Image (tube, rainbow, N blue to C red):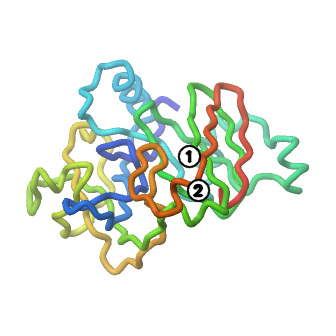
Amino acid sequence: MADKSVKVAITPTGKADSPVTTSGGSISYFVKPLEVEESFDEFLTYLQQQEYGGQDDKSNVKYAQSRTVEDDNMRTEYHSLYKDIEESIAFARIALKGNADAINMWIGNSRSTSCLHRDNYENIYCQIIGKKHFVLLPPVAMPCVNEQILQNATYAVDSGRDSTDQARSSSSCTQLGGKRDALPRTGEDFGSSKLRVVLDKNSPGIPFATWDPDTNEQTTPFSSLCSPLRVQLNPGDVLYLPAMW
């Protein structure tokens, strides 16, 4: 895999596909990561250096992810590793009456965080190395999560035009506009690039949870009644996450 090109998501905070607040404090945008292609070796080296202090704490966060179930990246992008894993998980195959529709792999360091969200399909999470922390809510907690319709936007490299320090920050997107950058070239230094939020033109809004159970921001009158279930996966652990959780 060392020289193979893989898709890498880049954000200033480690939160890909997440709500972003404006300078006024309200959440208005659902921001997707900047996506680039890098060699697998370059990507892993960056993750390790950032995790163990080789990169400045303000450097961007990189994450190898699959944004949709259709990506099936273990049988496409990472197909050379596919032979090293089981074709199916026995209990899941029996309980769900079938094999997995897709098998995806995510790779990140401790700065990578997924925002509160739900999937409309069953998930089986298998932890290979490191740890992953889950904050889980049942579907009946829907009134607690403060779902809002957010405008779609995407992080892009800040070229210095029509941008300010405020627009580049992780908590504001007051400067929007311009054309979306093409898929950036492999080898460019995106770890230290300034990123800004660019509004997706002619894109419909997306319903998304804005409550953060960890910081208790963007609450509803019902959020205090909710008690999230917290789970830590260690290497070798498997978690079944039902649809809509």
> Is residue 2 placed above or below 189 in the rendered structure?
above
Residue 180 visible within the image: yes
Relative depth, front residue between 104 and 237? 237
Q: Residue at x 54, y 51 (%)?
A: 66
Question: Dividing the image into 4 quarters, which one contains the C terminus?
Answer: bottom right
Please state if 167 lies on the left or on the right of 5 as rendered: left
Identify residue type, mark 2: Asp
Mark 1 belongs to which amino acid? Glu
- In percent of width and height, residue 57 lies at 26, 29
Q: Earlier in the sequence, mark 2 or mark 1?
A: 2
Residues packed near mark 1 inside 10 Å, few (<14), some (14 to 19) or many (20 plus): some
Q: Which residue position holds label 2? A: 71
Q: How many marks?
A: 2
Measured as percent of width and height from the top left, residue 90 is found at: 87, 41
Vertical relation: 177 (above or below) 19: below
Q: Nearer the viewer, residue 133 or 65?
A: 133
* Residue 156 image offset from top left, x and y in percent: 26, 56
* Residue in the picture at 35% in, 72% down: 151
Q: Is residue 217 above or below residue 201?
A: above
Is 226 positioned to the left or the right of 95 in the image? left
Label 1: element kind: loop
Residue that badge 1 annotates:
77
Kindly check if marks 2 and 1 are in contact, taking CB atoms under 8 A apart as contact: yes
For discs 2 and 1, the disc positioned in front in the rendered view: 2
Instruction: Give the image quarter of residue 235.
Output: top right
Give the distance between the C-alpha atoms of the residues marked 2 and 1, in whole angstroms.
Answer: 9 Å
Q: Is residue 70 visible?
A: no
Q: Residue at x 37, y 53 (%)?
A: 33
Q: Secondary structure at mark 2?
A: helix
